[in-house]
């Protein structure tokens, strides 16, 4: 299949979902023409020139300018990678099929537009264990301030609380972390991989409505156990206590964090089983056949 693939370079250097999906499509025999999403105005001309089978708007908040859809004969596939943060039903006029990475969104909108649920994944072309020394107890990678959390400083409050109450070292990477010896700025490329592998444990601090985070799969692919917010969707991917750790509130997060860091052999076995599960089920190349099949079924192909 030939796909015109509109996206941006966000997380490109850490094999984020956008790059990983594009390369996995190519690796499985599809032809992918990658176009920067700022060029959306040229879509009718590109579609006429390249004659793709499908057009993918692979960006969480990308839609067609008003009236453009009528100029294009190929099916338009919209993606909600960061649902529900950028979700709005007014985008549906741009799409023939909507792909969401959030199960709650899928259940909410599948009666409104042909919809496919597709989970994010790791990418074993990049994510892997490194034989390096551990330099901290735990790491967290992500922006310190999340504008769409009710408490925008939730991640800062959680990390500072854990440090204060446990005395453990937590290295935080990303934008807007307060100045501190254990806080660092944004990283990508090989630095990203080193950071994941540098701690005994990973932290995935999300809000109750957060989509299934790619960070969960990235740590697991590196053999590093991770703590994430307890959601049924998580346990469709990993077994709690054997492949992943989960919490409901800050008190439980503290208990799970301390108990497991004090048992390094237990942590090591959880990380190993998580990596094995990723190898079996959660590499991005495992997702492509189901994604393509789901889109084609939604289109009636």
Image (spheres, grey):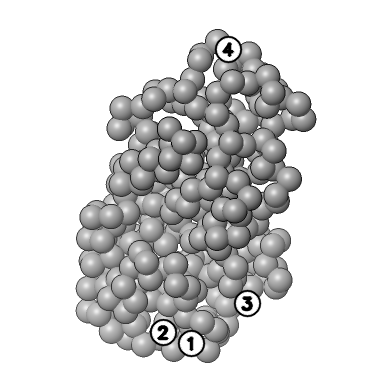
Residue 114, horizontal then vertical, whole percent = 55, 45
Residue 45 visible from this viewpoint: yes
What is the C-alpha distance between the residues marked 3 and 2? 17 Å
Left/right of residue 268 with respect to residue 219 in the rendered view: left
Q: How far apart are marks 1 and 3 (CA)?
A: 15 Å
**Residue 241 image offset from top left, x and y in percent:** 32, 79
| Residue matched to label 2 | 256
Q: Point out the frontmost of discs 1 and 3.
A: 1
**Which residue lies most toward the front here?**
300
Evaluate if marks 4 and 1 touch, with contact meaning CB atoms under 8 Å apart: no
Distance from Cα at disc 1 to Cα at disc 2: 6 Å
Which residue is the extreme one toward the top?
A: 49
How much space separates mark 3 and mark 4, taking CA atoms?
A: 52 Å
Asked if disc 1 and disc 3 are in contact, CB closer than 8 Å, the reply is no
Q: What kind of element bears circle 1?
A: helix
The residue beneath circle 4 is 48
How many numbered marks are there? 4
Q: Residue at x 60, y 60 (%)?
A: 108
Q: Earlier along the polypeptide chain: callout 4 or callout 1?
A: 4
Determine whether label 3 and label 2 are within 8 Å by CB. Answer: no
Q: Nearer the viewer, residue 235 or 203?
A: 235
Mark-to-mark CA distance, 4 and 2? 55 Å
Q: Name the residue under label 1.
A: 252
Residue 73 in percent (x, y) is at 59, 20
Quarter holding the N terminus is: top left
**Farthest right residue in view:** 66
Q: Where is residue 297 in the image (x, y as percent from the top left)?
A: 43, 40
Asked if the residue under mark 2 is in contact with the one under mark 1, i.e. CB atoms within 8 Å, the reply is yes
Q: How crowded is mark 1: few (under 14 residues within 10 Å), some or many (20 or more)?
A: few
N-terminal label among 1 and 3: 3
């Amino acid at each position: 299949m030939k796909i015109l693939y509109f996206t941006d370079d966000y997380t490109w250097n850490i094999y984020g979902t956008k790059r990983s999906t594009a390369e996995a499509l190519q690796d499985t025999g599809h032809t992918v023409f990658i176009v920067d999403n700022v060029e959306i105005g040229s879509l009718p001309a590109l579609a006429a020139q390249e004659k793709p089978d499908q057009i993918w708007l692979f960006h969480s908040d990308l839609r067609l300018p008003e009236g453009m859809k009528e100029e294009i004969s190929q099916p338009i596939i919209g993606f909600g990678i960061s649902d529900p943060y950028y979700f709005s039903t007014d985008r549906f006029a741009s799409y023939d099929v909507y792909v969401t990475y959030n199960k709650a969104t899928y259940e909410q909108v599948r009666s409104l537009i042909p919809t496919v649920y597709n989970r994010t994944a790791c990418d074993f072309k990049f994510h892997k264990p490194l034989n390096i020394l551990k330099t901290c107890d735990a790491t967290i990678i992500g922006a310190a301030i999340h504008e769409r959390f009710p408490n925008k400083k939730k991640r800062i409050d959680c990390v500072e609380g854990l440090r204060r109450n446990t005395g453990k070292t937590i290295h935080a990477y990303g934008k807007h972390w307060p100045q501190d010896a254990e806080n660092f700025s944004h990283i990508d490329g090989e630095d990203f991989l080193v950071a994941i592998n540098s701690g005994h444990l990973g932290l995935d601090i999300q809000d109750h409505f957060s989509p299934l985070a790619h960070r969960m799969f990235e740590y697991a692919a590196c053999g590093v156990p991770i703590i994430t917010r307890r959601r049924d969707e998580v346990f469709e991917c990993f077994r709690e206590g054997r492949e992943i750790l989960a919490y409901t509130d800050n008190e439980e997060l503290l208990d799970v964090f301390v108990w497991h860091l004090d048992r390094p052999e237990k942590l090591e076995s959880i990380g190993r089983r998580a990596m094995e599960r990723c190898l079996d089920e959660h590499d991005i190349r495992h997702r492509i056949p189901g994604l393509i099949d789901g889109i084609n079924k939604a289109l009636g192909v």
